[in-house]
Amino acid sequence: MAGNLSDPDSLIPALEGVTALHLINFDGTEGYTPLTTGAEIISLAAKAGVKRVTVLRGGDKGTVENALEASDLEWTFIQPVEFMSGVFDWIESIRDEGIVRAPFASVRSAMVHDSDIGAVIAAVLTQDGHAGKTYTLTGPQAMTIPQKVAAISDALGRDIKYFELSEQEARDDWRQQGLPDEVIEFFVMAHGNPPAQAYTVLPTIEQITGRPPLTLQDFVRDHAARYSSSSHVRAGS
């Protein structure tokens, strides 16, 4: 059953019988702009009988979070650092050339496995004790890009080289991909000068799920077929 967060009435059928709800705070259909419909969404959720809500936070607090804080619902905010799925940006060059080209070689990231984010959300929505909390989620290690490339190489069992781009070369590359200037500026900030939260390893995932967070090697092995030239041929044939 489908619904659109920017059109709250479209959610009514999907909310029938629901007691736990996971939300995002941005509009995925309109360039990831902040949602303006948070109050309406939370009002509908409460009327439908929803008791617990998690929000995957992106950027500043918005209308969804504000509405939840003003409600009687049990809410929890989830703040992951960089998703490991970001390494999908390198698939083509790894598959075709065995190379990763990226700027900011020395900047570290405690990137988190996408499945761990889902596991935390599932636990929070089905267990007591998480209401009113904000959880920052990280992976098990803060890694530089060369360390990420080494982990990918280890997971794939083949040598992957790293070639560092200058900031200007990265800007030119992003511009050639058609990215607008504001997105490019965000990338330069996020990848070149991230806040301490982005590279500070936290025990949150293990505390909530009862197991250590998954590694980048785990993530790449889970998606190894994407890096295979044979799967690329099959997909394009």
Image: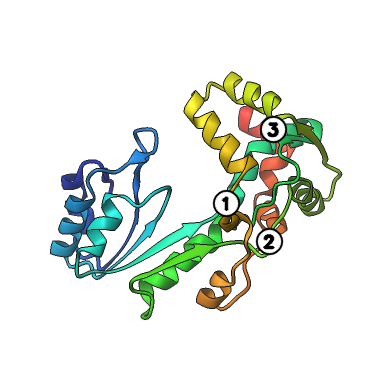
Mark 2 in CB contact with mark 3 (< 8 angstroms) = no
Residue 59 higher or lower than 126, as above or below: above
Residue that carries the numbered disc 3 in the rendered image: 92
Describe residue 230's horizontal placement relative to residue 68 as left or right: right
Q: Which residue is mark 1?
A: 195
Foreground: disc 1 or disc 2: 1
Q: Quadrant of the C terminus?
A: top right
Residue shown at the point (42%, 47%) measured from the top left: 59
Element marked by disc 1: loop
| Rendered image coloring scheme | rainbow
| Contact flag, marks 1 and 3 (Cβ < 8 Å) | no
Between discs 1 and 2, the one toward the N terminus: 1
Whether residue 237 is visible: no
Q: CA distance from mark 1 to mark 2?
A: 21 Å
Q: How many residues crowd mark 2 within 10 Å: few (<14), some (14–19), many (20+)? A: some
Distance between mark 2 and mark 3 Cα atoms = 22 Å
Amino acid marked by disc 1:
Pro
- Type of amino acid at the residue the image marks with label 2: Thr
Residue 74 position in % (x across, y down): 28, 71
Per the image, label 2 sits on a secondary structure element best described as: loop
Q: Is residue 187 visible?
A: yes
> Which mark is in front, 1 or 3?
1
Q: Earlier in the sequence, mark 1 or mark 3?
A: 3
Dot 2 or dot 3, earlier in sequence: 3
What amino acid type is highlighted by mark number 3?
Glu
- Residue drawn at the location 48% of the way across and 67% of the way down: 120
The picture places residue 130, in percent across and down from the top left corner, at: 38, 75
Residue 51: x, y in percent?
24, 70
Q: How crowded is the residue under tag 1: few (<14 C-alpha within 10 Å), some, or many (20+)?
A: few
Residue 121 in the image, given as x and y percentages of width and height: 43, 65
Picture quadrant of residue 201? bottom right
Q: Which mark is residue 215?
A: 2
